[in-house]
Image (tube, rainbow, N blue to C red):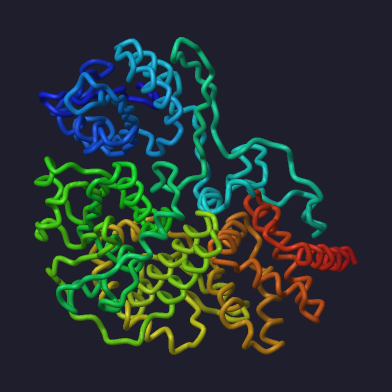
Amino acid sequence: MDSSVIDCVIAAEFDHDYGPVVKNVYPEGWFDGDDSEIGEIMIPDQIHERPSDWNVVFLYDHNQKSSRRTLLSFALTRKSNDTSRGAVIRSLAICTTLQNVEPFKPFLTLAVAEYSANPSLDIITRLFHSLHSIKLNTIPKLDHNAKSILILLPEPNKPPLKSVDELRSDSDLVAPAAQNTLLPSAELIQTTELTYTVAVPFKAMGRTSDIPFKYPLAVPEEFVVQIPVEGYLKSLASLNVSLSSPNCFPDVFTSGSSTHPLIIIINAILTEKRLLFVGVGLSSSDITETVLTAVLIASGYGLAPGILERTFPYASLSRVSQLVEIPGYIAGVCSPAFGSHPEWWDIMIDINTGVISASGTSRTAAPNSSSGSFIDQSFVTDIAKLLDLRAPASALLLRSRNYVRELIAITAEMERRYNGATDLENIRTEKDKGNLAYPGAGIVWPIKSNENSEIAVHSPFVESFRQTSIHKRLGLIPKQEVKVDFRHQLQLLQRRGSSMSGDEIVKLYSTLPNFLKTSQDIYQFTLELTSAYCDIKHLALGLFHPRTSVRTATARCLATVESSYPGKFVIQQLSTVEHLAYMSAASLATKAIKS
């Protein structure tokens, strides 16, 4: 079985008699079917007015061994007075089973530069054989728990990694020395990055060079290509809403016409509405990256499964009959014809004008009257602040992930209320319930009455979400038995800590370390510290508590977290003052253990 990272290389160009056409496919005969659509994708609309353009699409073929391939294409426009359009347009594409195609860009850039000036099958074959030498089975795979944490970490701040084995949650995460001391580690191990890198010899423009193929290991399922998320998210957040009826899709427009654009996009994707992005005259890369940004945000950076399977970052008018038959498609197009056919879509976003429109075909009940949603308002406010502060993409994606997670938690709570159980969350055992200071699970609301109002606001969304394939897949994910809901405990500190009495704080901090015993416990706790926005800061407040027992209990929690690789990153988020307080409290705890 061929386990190469590449399936084929495709060459296309604009023919002044026939339009976009596929000229070559190597290996010959690999692509069996109508290639006219491939040509339209590789030579996007209005490309003759731009110097170059990237495009990413997904190919589906039930005859292939894998049902989905990713196609990355790069087109160059070379001005010429000998053609009717004043330009020669040529493009190369690679087809791969890998979803993340960013590592292929350097190779395509060099190959297209040579092919554009001198189209030759030799260039295509050289590109294929260079990439064909990279085998899929040589790319390491991370443990699921470790990956869940690592995808949320900003790359420059990730501590070095000794080996992939260090990331396995079933290994002994606590070093022997850490079992009789709680002092933080003095230095980090000098190791490699979380990127699989191989040097690939590639001949282009008459010169052979070793081009690095860099494949990141800690990326979510919905990551396809590197995107300037900050810019696209800012544009999406400033869209305007235009509703033909106040009751249009109340599961999407949960606050009617005043629903924030980001909430609309997330709700539309999670309830599997047909969502269309239209960008007339825009580059295919702009349209594609807008769609993929929306998918990253709405999926909770990989939290909600299966969304890419109905995503078409760039679709041509020629395939509209196929597209509109796909339930809940998410597509980007450049043709204005889509706007005049509301029967083709449920929600349309005009990227040019910044207007969100609904088709008016509502299949759900009218929205519940409400003064608003705490989690919606908190999410929108936080995103606006992060954009103003020019925060990195990781911070924006992390905040989006937390919002989607809260939507799933509200769904789980409604299912527990009305059905008595839910398949969306881990199974909590009752064995150690009595040892917790504050037993409980699920979201902690700043005010208890918030819970009922949030359920009322989101009930139309929940009713629709429970009918989706996303909900079904979340329910099929194997669940683990857990003794404590760490998210609940940390949110108690974050959202109610300021109103707790001194004795209540002592009880909460003192019982937490007792539940950090196994490697699985440590990973679950670390995951919550990483994915619950700024919770490390709220946990660290215990380092400054007047009672020694609270300070040492906090240090025990932090030292246990630091014993794992991802936990080293979490500890790095402490300020200098907090870290000094941590070392002081850890020293006290160590003396207490030894005595």
**Residue 135: image x %, image y %?**
44, 24
Is 260 or 143 nearer to us in this picture?
260
Q: Of residues 155 and 218, which is closer to you in this image?
A: 155
Whether 165 is drawn above or below 252: the answer is above
Where is residue 105, by image quadrant? top left
Question: Left or right of 123: which side holds 257?
Answer: left
Quarter of the C terminus within the rendering: bottom right
Q: Residue at x 20, y 58 (%)?
A: 274
Using the image as rendered, state which of residue 516 and residue 285 is in the foreground. 285
Q: Quadrant of residue 354?
A: bottom left
In the orientation shown, which residue stands out farthest toward the right? 595
Q: How many marks?
A: 0
In the picture, measured across the screen, residue 82 lies left or right of residue 100, that is: left
* Residue 401 vertical position relative to residue 69 in the rendered view, above or below: below
Question: Residue 536 placed where, x, y %?
Answer: 64, 66
On the image, the x and y values in percent for residue 85 come to 19, 28
Q: Is residue 385 left or right of residue 41?
A: right
Q: Quadrant of the N terminus?
A: top left
Q: What's the residue at 34%, 14% (across, down)?
A: 125
Residue placed at 30% from the left, 28% from the top? 77
Q: Where is residue 460? Give x, y as percent.
A: 25, 76
